[in-house]
Amino acid sequence: MLETIWQSIAQTPDYLFDANKRIFIGYSIMALILAALAYGLRKSKKSTRGFFRYVFAKKIWWAPSARQDYQLWIYNRVLKALLFTPIILTMVPVALATTELLEGAFGLRAPMPLSETSVVIIFTVLLFLADDFSRFLLHYALHKVPFLWHYHEVHHSAKVLTPFTIYRSHPLESYLYACRMALSQGMVVGVCYYLFGTKLSMVDILGANIFVFAFNAMGSNLRHSHVWLSWGRHVEKWLISPAQHQIHHSDNPQHFDTNLGSALAIWDRLFGTLIRADEVGKISIGVGQYDAGHDSIWAIYTKPVRDSFASLKPKRKADTMKKPVA
């Protein structure tokens, strides 16, 4: 067990060099460039020193909430390795089961006569769409199902946003997202294997799906930051901008349960949960009057468990008259 803990801690810096991780150094550099553009457009007095003070403000990066995020980045990796790795659903059995289900329903068939290039493009697009839509659906459920909301509230209890806020999550939520990825990718692999045979490969950049890489390079690390970057009303109908995700973290009840998408805004448009940046004024971050009570790492891990099971108890009539948490 001690070896597992040490390996998890020792491998944590690898996130900086993995293009499948949000804080990959390449994405961070792009975020800095975009932050510089945003700074130049919004600030009348500009200087290099002023820019770095603006981006790396001590009151943001060293706030108690931010320090919790840094700890959770480490602790959650250890807990995942110790508790969840053996039981996380993996892609291979899902893919095999999907292919077998299709073969049972429609019989064996020869691969479709498409060029290898066409198959690669189709496979890459389907992987991205399935991953993005499944992220939206799970995120929607985390907001709308009271039992699940108490776990997701950990993420929304952040009082400041930094790129490390992406790792501010309860282990149960992280487990659900890992299983979601296995299900979505496994189903796509299974369907494409049935349709196209063995010539499946993905268009990638440094191991990341090209669409995921492009999205992350477009300032994904600014989603969890105080740097306001909008892409304009027309683009934001199709893609979720950093500013739109900051609205998602707003403590204004009018913004609760909005902009739930990861990359594509089309899912929010379909579900009626989209807000553009030009529709919103100044925002502040957090859960507003509904203090989550996540003032310590212990509370972050234990309070959602207590609250979630308490939400399953039959409510008294007086309780039903209270305003919902989110």
Image: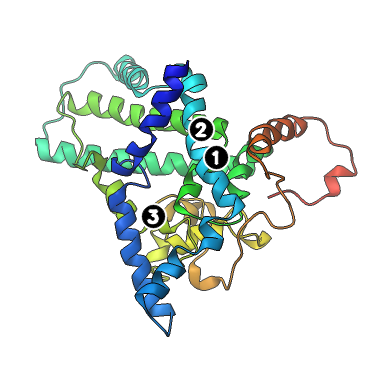
Query: For mark 3, what is the residue?
Result: 220
Residue at point 75%, 49% (across, down): 324
**Labels in figure, total:** 3
Does any portion of residue 31 appear in the rendered image? yes
Q: Residues within 10 Å of mark 3 (few under 14, many from 20)?
A: many
Figure check: 140 above or below 315: below
Query: For mark 1, what is the residue?
Result: 169
Q: Position of residue 311 (x, y in %)?
A: 75, 34
Q: Quadrant of residue 85?
A: top left
Camera-nearest residue between 152 and 17: 17
Q: Determine the CA span between mark 2 and mark 1.
A: 8 Å
Q: Residues within 10 Å of mark 2 (few under 14, many from 20)?
A: some
N-terminal of the pair, mark 2 or mark 3, is 2
Residue at point 14%, 28% (across, down): 199
Camera-nearest residue between 81 and 198: 81
Q: Which amino acid type is marked by label 1? A: Ser
Query: For mark 2, what is the residue?
Result: 76
Q: Quadrant of residue 204?
A: top left
Residues at badges 2 and 3 in contact (C-beta under 8 Å)? no
Q: Which amino acid type is marked by label 2? A: Asn
Q: Which amino acid type is marked by label 3? A: Ser
